[in-house]
Image: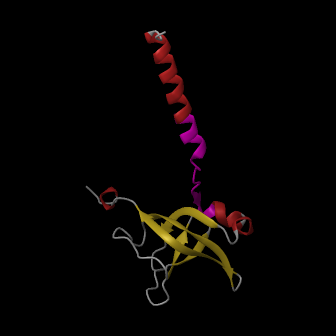
Amino acid sequence: MSATRSTRLLIVGVALLALISLMLISVDPEVQYTVDEIMESPSDFEDEEVHLRGIVMEGSVDDVNKVFILSGTEAQIFVDISYVALPDGFAEGYVIAVKGDLLKVDDKWIISANSIQTGCPSKYDAE
């Protein structure tokens, strides 16, 4: 006995809905915090990988020690870039996203970066 066209469409629709639901369930959303949100209670994120965004503070990039300061509205945090290559769009004063482990070293909070992402430089150029 052959299924009617509407029955076949219903079966295909249910199968597609099930596949889409499985995809959405399996994707773990990555929360991106601001520097201020992390620094409100940094011990909550200690020794965890965090994803945060902020502004590279003017005059803070230290190429010798491989560190810079990532700034929020009210707080700042050091970012260790010893183990990551800086992307082409990286510059002081730009908003960037940093992924890395939040560590407490000598009573200072530091992000040991494993990934740095910049926006498109054309977004920052004056017209």
Residue situated in front as seen by the camera: 101 or 123? 101
Question: Is residue 95 among the parts visible in the rendering?
Answer: yes
For the point 74% across and 65% down, the residue is 44
- Residue farthest toward the left in the current orientation of the protein: 127
Residue 63: image x %, image y %?
Answer: 43, 86
Residue 102 is a magenta residue:
no
Classify residue 60 as left or right of residue 89. Answer: right
Residue situated in front as seen by the camera: 78 or 16? 16
Question: Is residue 74 among the parts visible in the rendering?
Answer: no
Q: Quarter holding the C terminus?
A: bottom left
Residue 47: image x %, image y %?
Answer: 68, 72
For the point 63% across and 62% down, the residue is 36
Q: Is residue 29 above or below residue 102?
A: above
Classify residue 10 as left or right of residue 36. Answer: left
For the point 74% across and 69% down, the residue is 43
Image color mode: secondary structure
Residue situated in front as seen by the camera: 124 or 120? 120
Residue 56: image x %, image y %?
Answer: 47, 71
Magenta part of the protein: which range? 20-36
> To which quarter of the image does residue 99 belong?
bottom right
Residue situated in front as seen by the camera: 116 or 90? 116
- Residue farthest toward the front in the current orientation of the protein: 1
For the point 57% across and 39% down, the residue is 22
Residue 13: image x %, image y %?
Answer: 49, 23
